[in-house]
Amino acid sequence: MAVLEIVTIPDAVLRRKARKVTAFDKEFQILVDDMVETMRAAPGVGLAAPQVGVSLRLIVVEFGSEEDEEAPKKLYIVANPEIVMASEEKVTGIEACLSVPGLVGEVERHKSIIVRGLNRQGKPIKVKAEGWLARIFQHEIDHLDGIIYTDRASRVWQPKEDEELALAD
Ligand code: NI
């Protein structure tokens, strides 16, 4: 496994619509492992393949519980993710992105969503996500369509040193 370099704006790969994953071969498995390692090393709560310079529809997310900090984190690996249900209710929260260093922004997202996609073996999976987990998935799936959270933010600012940083993904 290897920690990959995270590409930052204005790299063009971050603005491209990523292509679907069609091969779940050895090369793909290495990419999955490297992305998980890169996300953990950053550290971040999520990472999309374009952020490591690979224009593929693949995301990794690792998040515990927002109510219980002691709860074990859960790792999600989703190829070709699609939001198939999104709540009408939206919530505003603060986001950051490993590809946009030094900034945070306030973004409105669906409170809960259902994501369908494929696991690392290419088998169909479904994830129900709420709150922060739903926010992370929406942020990562946006990356696959070349959308960066600052495009959707109502405001973006440079956090002060003592300001608690948002989760980065
Ligand atoms: Ni991001």
Image (cartoon, rainbow, N blue to C red):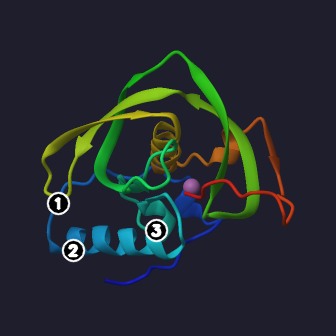
Which residue in the rendered view is the most extreme toward the bottom? 2
Q: Is mark 3 within 8 Å of ligand 1?
A: no
Reply above or below: 64 against 28: above
Query: Which residue was labeled with disc 3?
Result: 39
Hey, which quadrant is residue 162 in on the image?
bottom right
Q: Earlier in the sequence, mark 1 or mark 3?
A: 1
Q: Nearer the viewer, residue 169 or 62?
A: 62
User: Considering the image in quadrants, where does the C terminus appear?
Assistant: bottom right
Q: Is residue 120 left or right of residue 162?
A: left
Q: Is residue 132 left or right of residue 104?
A: left
Residue 46 showing in the rendered view? yes
Residue 53 showing in the rendered view? no
Q: Residues within 10 Å of mark 3 (few under 14, many from 20)?
A: many
> For the residue marked with disc 3, what is the amino acid?
Met
Q: Position of residue 52 (x, y in %)?
A: 47, 70
Q: Nearer the viewer, residue 142 or 163?
A: 163
Where does ligand 1 appear, by image quarter? bottom right
Q: Nearer the viewer, mark 1 or mark 3?
A: 3
Query: Which residue was labeled with disc 2?
Result: 27
Give SS at disc 2: helix
> For the residue marked with disc 1, what is the amino acid?
Ala
Reply above or below: 143 against 131: below
Give SS at disc 3: helix
Q: Position of residue 15 (x, y in %)?
A: 57, 53
Residue at image location 29% in from the left, 72% down from the top: 33
Callout 3 touching callout 2 (CB < 8 Å): no
Hey, which quadrant is residue 21 in on the image?
bottom left
Q: Position of residue 159 (x, y in %)?
A: 82, 58
> For the residue marked with disc 2, what is the amino acid?
Glu
Q: Nearer the viewer, mark 3 or mark 2?
A: 3
